Image: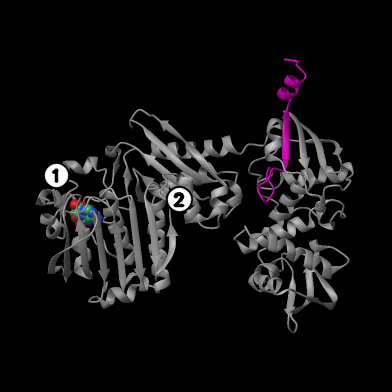
Amino acid sequence: MPIKVLDPKTVARIAAGEVVERPASVVKELVENALDAGATQITVEVRGGGVSLLRVTDNGVGIPAAEVELAFERHATSKITSADDLTSVLTLGFRGEALASIATVAQVDMVTATVGSEVGTQVVLENGVVTHRGSQGRPPGTTVTVTNLFRKLPARLKFLKSPATENSHIANVVSQYALAFPEVKFTLMVEGRVTLRTPGSGRLLDSVAQVYGLEVARNILEIESAQWRDSRSDSTQVTGMVSAPSVARSSRSYLSFFINRRWVNSRLLAWAVEEAYHGLLMEGRHPVAVINVALPPAEVDVNIHPTKTEIKFHNERAVFLAVQRAVRQALVQQMPVPQIEEVATTYRAPSAGEVGTPVSASLFPPALVANQTPASALPVLRVLGQFRSSFIVAEGPDGLYLIDQHAAHERILFERFLGHRDASAAERQALLEPLPVELTPRQQALVEEMAEALEEQGFSLEPFGERAYLVRAVPAALGEKDVAQAVLRFLDLVEREDAVSDRRERVAISLACHSAIRAGQALNPEEMRELLRQLEETQIPRTCPHGRPTMIHLSADALAREFRRR
Ligand code: ADP
Ligand code: MG
């Protein structure tokens, strides 16, 4: 469609308001234009937090030479022609205001070429007025360079945060679109360095790996494309990915929602996702999720906010349920308590190094996670015995359970340690005489980085000359005669847990792993019952803090089948 200025009646129907709040808003509008132009490669360059320079280059359809100036007119768009079109918009843009708004608050240089045009068109605008028009060779596509953003608006400049913060807002915008459009190759360059690059393979997993890293990508579950029908809406389709509970994060900023591929904020959908994790995450933990909802355009109003990031569903309940069910289904189908047939692939036996050290004294004081209802409750289990001094054999109402005593104890201790918000909550063991230990430079760096989390768990470590530390107190859970050795072994574990990004969690996992009873340790029936009782009280009894199963289940049915009784 050619670019045209919308009639006043349509303009009146468009949500009014400012589009350009900060550099990231400019990036959002330019990237949306590139996507609407069908680009398969989009490069974003940023300097000085986006104030000195922002450049977006695409290989989309370009703008015909005769329409370039028109594109910068207020309410000029090629995407809708009348107010009626507002109910069926499938493009990201439709207001015809972005280029006009950007040109009034910055200097803009655009070079654009369409397929088949011999040369591209260049225009430069200052204060919203074209000051230069010429031609320039370039392949089909568009490059928009924005400089001196807000230079004439000192009040706006003052409102901006540090370049690093503005850069991170920009990186977030580019990341979100990279997740929404895995088939598009995105490159983000900040101050001359490539900070994000997606392959444009069309696989969401590849984008997730680039945006959130390998640890998340390895632990992400695909949402099966499922259609939910109800009486009012034609159909709502939910696709995307959600993290396994083991890689939860401590903030909600890892939730992305795309409605018909438009990135939106939605508290409703954030709630739907969190509901789906009910019972699988500990308090204060949040999942990573990329949720795409496709529904008929008439079912959603995208014209309620100038930046188009807020939307309104005509049938909120239907969308809420569709998202909640799709996520829940992905979680339940892909991470049940492993059944015996799956054991070979999901169960990892404790390694040789985990065998043969004494029961930690920390098993028998009652768990501190009291008065929290266990979220994904275990059935009542009756201890039958121990196998190979490593597994507890128990009977439940629906079959036989094998519990990995080390993994189960790790889960119990992990939740208890994570509950320590300050050193006073931790059980400490003060040393009669401070004990010097010598650390490697790496260990020393680790101790400095983790200082706060270590203190919360009851460690008191003081620098003592070069490389040496004085140990004044340790968590009682470290419980060994040779404290110096125990500290070093514990630090080794902390070093190994480098996949855990949250410091408090990393220390708690390491301490749990260090102090949990080992495989190979004989337990008496009373000890086994106590272990299961404490496991029942945990919030997530079925997996250890590394996400491995604490138990496997052989159902009565499966047994009957094996013995050919049915
Ligand atoms: P809107 O996107 O709402 O239509 P804009 O002000 O962002 O409004 O853009 C105005 C018009 O300029 C668009 O409708 C489109 O025709 C054209 N345009 C803008 N950016 C590009 C681009 N990167 N490639 C092709 N056409 C573009
Ligand atoms: Mg636009």
Secondary structure at badge 2 equals helix
Q: Are discs 2 and 1 less than 8 Å apart at CB?
A: no
Mark 1 Cβ inside 8 Å of ligand 1: no
Label 2: few (<14), some (14–19) or many (≥20) C-alpha neighbours in 10 Å: many
Residue 549: give x, y in percent of width and height.
Answer: 69, 43
Inter-mark Cα distance, 2 to 1: 36 Å
In this picture, residue 455 sits left or right of residue 144: right
The one of 9 and 355 positioned closer to us in this rendering: 355
Please tell me which residue lies in front, 272 or 225. Answer: 225
- Say which quadrant the N terminus sits in: top left
Residue 488 drawn in magenta: no
As drawn, the residue found furthest toward the bottom would be 465
Q: Which residue is mark 2?
A: 207
Left or right: 1 with respect to 342?
A: left
In this view of the protein, can residue 22 be seen by the observer?
no
> Residue at horizontal 75%, vertical 46%?
408
Can you give x and y, in whole percent of width and height, for residue 173 in the image? 38, 58
Q: Residue at x 70, y 68 (%)?
A: 454
> Which amino acid type is marked by label 1?
Ser
- Who comes first in sequence, dot 2 or dot 1? 1
Which residue in the protein does label 1 denote? Answer: 82
- Where residue 113 appears, x then y in whole percent? 20, 56
* Up-down relation of residue 36 to residue 54 (above or below): above
Instruction: Give the image quarter of residue 490.
Output: bottom right
Instruction: Locate the C terminus and report the quarter of the image it occupies.
Output: top right
Q: Residues within 10 Å of mark 1 (few under 14, many from 20)?
A: some
Q: Disc 2 marks which amino acid? A: Ser
**Which residues fall within the magenta stretch?**
542-566
